[in-house]
Amino acid sequence: MKTIDALNVYYRDLNSSIDEVVKTDKTINLKNVFGQRYIGRGLPENVKLKIYGTPGNDMAAYMDGAELEIFGNGQDAVGNTMNCGRVIVHGSCGDTLGYAMRGGEIYVEGDVGYRVGIHMKEYKEMKPIIVAGGKAGEFLGEYMAGGAIILLGLNLSKGENITGRFCGTGMHGGVIYLNGNEDKYKFGKEAVKVDITNEDILFLKKHIGFYEKTFQKDLNHLKLESFSKYAAVNKNPYSNMYCTY
């Protein structure tokens, strides 16, 4: 295992060092990370980074199978257009988490920001998944076209909501699972609440189970049957905006 000290290292130089090291060593510890952007961008499978600190925007952008584990918070656009792989954040994340994400998994121990899962999509076996342990900001799942978002809402204060307004605005695919129920006004007109099925329960059990094990939580109190599920009303809501032939 190789260790790279990122203290005061320019982001381009840091990413160049990572690219060079993974040619011979697939496991790297990054210490003293402080805002460097694009860490993990495009990294292939069998590469593992353990990141200590706070990486900058667009971490794991276009990532192609690697695993990143962050012992700290993530900033904005984590997993931007990520193809596959896994991101584990022992902290919280900022806005546009999973922007245009096409595959892979992101697990966030704490809260996430605005526009999480915007433009997420799926194709055949590629189905991206985001699991967050806390709450999310407004526009969750905006223009979502595939994949799944799971919000656990752990440790919410009394009267605190699991998500902000405008959830599922422009949604035309994928699913959003929330621990409990939210008021209808929180959702855009393109999203609708649907029944939880046995298949959904198994799906939630698998990914919440991984969250529980990874972050060493006891989640036996969660009642998966009480989760609410939201899906798109229409898979092609903008057809009337384009010409047909």
Image: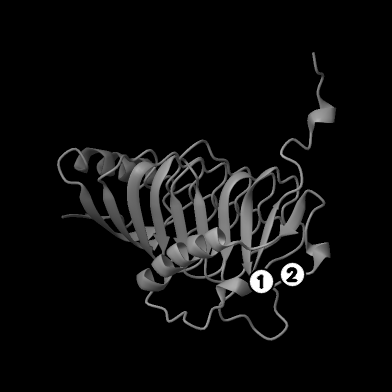
Q: Report x, y in % for residue 146.
A: 59, 44
Residue at x-position 55% and y-position 53%: 76
The residue singled out by tag 1 in the image is 162
Of the 4 image quadrants, the one containing the N terminus is: bottom left
Report, in whole angstroms, how far the alpha carbon at label 1 lies from the one at label 2.
8 Å
Observer-nearest of 118 and 189: 189
Q: In the drawing, does residue 196 fall left or right of residue 39?
A: right
- Residue 152 at x, y percent in the picture: 56, 71
Vertical side of 153 occupied by 127: above or below:
above
Residue under the image location 63 percent in, 63 percent down = 196
Label 2 SS: loop
Q: Is residue 108 visible?
A: no
Q: Earlier in the sequence, mark 1 or mark 2?
A: 1
Residue at the image position 31 percent from the left and 39 percent from the top: 44
Within 10 angstroms of label 1, few (less than 14), some, or many (20 or more) residues?
many
- From the viewer's perspective, is 134 left or right of 14? right
**Amino acid bearing label 2:** Glu
Residue 164 left/right relative to 27: right
Residue 135: percent from left, percent from top? 61, 69
Do the CB atoms of the residues marked 1 and 2 lie less than 8 Å apart? yes
Q: Residues within 10 Å of mark 2 (few under 14, many from 20)?
A: some
Which residue does the numbered mark 2 point to in the structure image? 182
The amino acid pointed to by label 1 is Ile
Q: Quadrant of the C terminus?
A: top right
Q: Which residue is at a point 35% across and 43% down the rendered structure image?
A: 65
